[in-house]
Image (spheres, coloured by chain):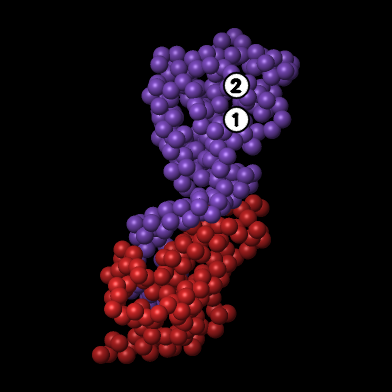
Chain colours: A purple, B red
């Protein structure tokens, strides 16, 4: 949203008498811009944040589908800069485009949803990593698989470490369930959103 | 260096561009011109050369959009017995009664723009002196009455 900034050059204060730009004006103009941009098909990436039990999640979608989910620990500003670089700089905050995924994630955290139905845009993931992500979606709710098992399912049993890095760079955590991949000895292993978040998700799925 | 998300451009420059649109067009058309400016800027943004002065670019776009409005307005018939086509959507309309817009409105468009660019954006190369002198005069006259 726009921040009120004092006119830096109006030293004489002539323009101080013009109406101020308050929050309401900023919000209205922003909403209008988003609507016009969607209608013209020039809003390439829409985003919003939602509060969840594992902290604020950033959600971003292209016109094809959900392209990015990010934890607060990943620094949302940096993630948005990355989207500007890797997808398109035509990025605006537009909660409406993400209404459905936001609702599904809320239902998931409430224990009322086991499978996500929103369309996904996997353009941020390439090659073997993308293959791994597609196999992650085969691990059902409440289940886990080892890094070795995912490597085998992805067609390269020796690529256990590569599965680890595919999970660590998963652009769609929570929705593409890399949290369900654990070590062969049964311990949790690392997680893109931190070990506490992984524990929270696995506990939720085990008890819901 | 890659470009910033456009959301940041709106946050950083939105208020300045709105001030310029208001000073040039007044309360009724300013928000339309702002919206058209930022929609056009969003469309063209990926093609903007790295290192460009974004504020100057946006003001240039706003300048063109304001001209479009003035031209469209001059083509509209003046219907005195009809209600205005649109209400002024400015929530802070109280500020418009200060006399600044009245003074600005009395000036030719070119002077109004020059004043807006000088005071609100700080573009000295736009030769603002003439317009400012006129505005000061008009305002002072207004105050002494």
Of the image marks 2 and 1, the number of the one nearer the N terminus: 2
Q: Position of residue A208 (x, y in %)?
A: 40, 16
Residue at left 44%, top 30%? A104
Q: Disc 1 sits on a residue from what chain? A: A
**Residue topped by disc 1:** A170
Asked if residue B68 is positioned above or below residue A84 in the image, the reply reads below
Q: Position of residue B49 (x, y in %)?
A: 66, 61
Q: Disc 2 sits on a residue from what chain? A: A
CB contact under 8 Å: marks 2 and 1: yes
Looking at the rendered structure, the number of numbered marks drawn on it comes to 2
- Residue B59 appears in the figure: no
Q: Position of residue B98 (x, y in %)?
A: 29, 77
Image disc number at residue A51: none
> Of A188 and A70, which appears nearest the observer?
A70
Determine whether the residue tagged by mark 2 lies in a helix, strand or loop: helix
Residue at left 36%, top 88%? B138
- Residue A83 appears in the figure: yes
């Amino acid at each position: 949203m726009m921040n009120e900034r004092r006119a830096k050059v109006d030293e004489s204060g002539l323009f101080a008498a013009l109406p101020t730009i308050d929050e309401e004006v900023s919000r209205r103009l922003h909403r209008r811009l988003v609507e016009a941009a969607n209608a013209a098909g020039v809003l390439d990436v829409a985003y919003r944040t939602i509060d969840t039990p594992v902290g604020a999640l950033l959600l971003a979608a292209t016109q094809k589908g959900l392209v990015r989910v990010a934890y607060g620990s990943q620094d949302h500003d940096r993630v948005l800069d990355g989207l500007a670089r890797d997808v398109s700089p035509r990025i605006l905050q537009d909660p409406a485009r993400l209404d459905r995924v936001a609702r599904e994630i809320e239902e998931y955290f409430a224990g009322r949803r086991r499978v996500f139905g929103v369309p996904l845009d996997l353009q941020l993931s390439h090659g073997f990593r993308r293959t791994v992500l597609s196999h992650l979606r085969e691990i059902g709710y409440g289940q886990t698989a080892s890094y070795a098992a995912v490597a085998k399912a992805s067609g390269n049993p020796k690529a256990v470490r590569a599965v680890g890095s595919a999970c660590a760079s998963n652009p769609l955590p929570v929705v593409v369930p890399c949290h369900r991949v654990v070590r062969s000895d049964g311990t949790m292993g690392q997680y893109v959103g931190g070990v506490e978040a992984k524990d929270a998700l696995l506990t939720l799925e085990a008890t819901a | 260096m890659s470009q910033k998300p456009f959301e940041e451009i709106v946050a950083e420059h939105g208020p300045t561009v709105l001030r310029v649109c208001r000073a040039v067009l007044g309360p009724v058309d300013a928000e339309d011109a702002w919206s058209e400016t930022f929609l056009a800027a969003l469309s063209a943004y990926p093609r903007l050369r790295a290192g460009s002065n974004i504020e100057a670019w946006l003001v240039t776009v706003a300048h063109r959009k304001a001209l479009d409005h003035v031209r469209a307005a001059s083509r509209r018939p003046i219907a005195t017995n009809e209600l205005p086509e649109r209400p002024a959507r400015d929530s802070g309309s109280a500020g418009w009664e200060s006399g600044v817009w009245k003074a600005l409105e009395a000036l030719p468009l070119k002077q109004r723009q020059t004043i807006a660019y000088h005071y609100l954006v700080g573009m000295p190369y736009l030769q603002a002196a003439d317009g400012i002198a006129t505005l000061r005069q008009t305002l002072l006259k207004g105050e002494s009455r």
